[in-house]
Image (cartoon, rainbow, N blue to C red):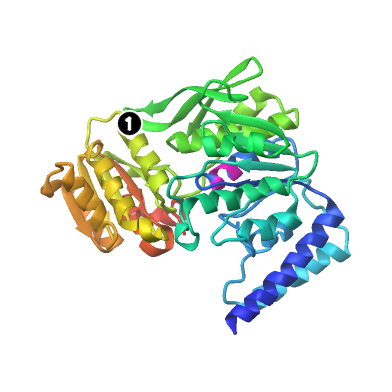
Amino acid sequence: MKKIFKKIIVSILTLEARLVLKKYKPKIVAVTGSVGKTTAKDSIYTVLSASFFVRKSEKSFNSEIGVPLSVLGCQNGGNNPAIWFKDIFEGLLLILFKNHYPKWLVLEVGADHPGDIVNIARWLKPDIAVITRFAEIPAHVEFFSSPKDIIKEKKQLAKYLKKDGFLILNYDDEDVLSMKNEFNKKTVTYGLNEGADVMGSNTGVLYENNKASGVTFKANHKGSCVPVNTKGILGITHIYPALAAIAVGSTQGLNVVEMSQSLSGEHKAQPGRMRLIDGIKDSLIIDDSYNSSPLAVQTALETLSEIETNGRKIAVLGDMMELGKYTVDSHKKIGELSAGICDILVTVGVRSKDTAKGALGKKMTKKNVIEFEDSKKAGEYLKKIIEKGDVILVKGSRWAMRMEKTVEEIMAEPERADKLLVR
């Protein structure tokens, strides 16, 4: 019965969303990829909203129900029929009466199952499609025949791009860049490698009071080279989205200096995405608890390795979900990588026992590899061992592992948890 109800709601809201788009004709930026969709969406919103009236997807509204809700500006009703009927009513009001509707929509489009992208893209028909990055073993791979099928699915977004639309591609990802020749579209590339239309360089970590405090890099575009300094976040996972945002802005003739100023001053990353949080005993937490996949963990660990600190480097890694037959091998490889970066590895969950095995196989000592099945208990343990100057990376799949519970146990101001953590 619930499935039938959901199907009916999705059909109604999708129809309303299509009628709203037809009536108000907003410009649409659609973002997809295996890694960095939400962060790219937020960065693009930051850049465009400085010049236009823009709405973005809330949180990770990227599904068959999330995208129509974003178009309509409504909330997810969950298990509350009253909210769903309210959403439908608000959609009708948008259609029947003139409304002050956004000129731009920045929407995230995901693919949990085969056909998801096509079902959305064929009616969304974006003006700009942004492809972030693909992964060797992406999240949700268990629902597809192979990782290549996920890539094929996500490429469909470009197929439904408007005739005069722009394709924004990650220059550093070969599978993404191949779309430049595959689709006959106006293309702007971004990346850190020489040859990208929007190229990042001089990447680094900002420090304040001997603590990492943000990321810094330079954005190069058509002869201009401008600095971007973003506080409160770390990692290349925030540099690529910023470059993607500048690439999108460049298609609309926005000034690169003004875009860099927006990213440096106004941009705020969502909770749980490489956010920096003060920890107990003058430690520093890298909160990446929103979700997890092999490529995302690898990137987070590489960021941890780059940080300068007088303390220890601790990684708290929870299970990565929906990897199917790749589960054991993926966790083991993450453990092997961790062994060369971390002083202490804390694993959380049944699947992460293979992460611990991978680290031990690389000669990490047993006393420095600690296993838990519960994220809160992992946090309680960390409370006892954290020392001044320690940097703690926390990451794991969102709904299954709830790694924000670990962060809450060790943050310096737990009373601010509702504001700072994933909820």
Where residue 329 appears, as percent x and y from the top left, is 30, 52
Please give the count of numbered marks on the rendered protein: 1
Q: Position of residue 231 (x, y in %)?
A: 47, 34
Residue placed at 82% from the left, 53% from the top? 100
Q: Nearer the viewer, residue 415 or 130?
A: 130
**Side of 126 where 230 appears, left or right:** left
Q: Residue at x 40, y 33 (%)?
A: 213
Q: Residue at x 55, y 37 (%)?
A: 241
Rendered location of residue 97, percent (x, y):
88, 63
Where the N terminus falls, by quadrant? Answer: bottom right
Q: On the image, which quarter does residue 371 sit in?
A: bottom left
| Residue drawn at point x = 33 percent, y = 36 percent | 304
Magenta region, main secondary structure: helix
Taking depth in this image into account, of 296 and 142 the one nearest to the observer is 142
Q: Residues within 10 Å of mark 1 (few under 14, many from 20)?
A: some
Q: Quadrant of residue 408?
A: bottom left
- Magenta span: 37-41
Q: Is residue 195 visible?
A: yes
Query: Regarding mark 1 in the picture, which secondary structure is present there?
Result: loop
Question: Viewed as shown, does residue 363 lie left or right of 267?
Answer: left
- 301 in magenta: no
Tell me if residue 174 comes above or below residue 150 in the rendering: above
Please say whether residue 39 is one of the residues in the magenta stretch: yes
Amino acid at pointer 1: Ile
Position of residue 265 in the picture relative to residue 337 (left or right): right
Q: Which residue is mark 1?
A: 307
Identify the residue at the far bottom of this view. 1
Coordinates of residue 356 in the picture (x, y in percent): 21, 52
Q: Is residue 402 visible?
A: no
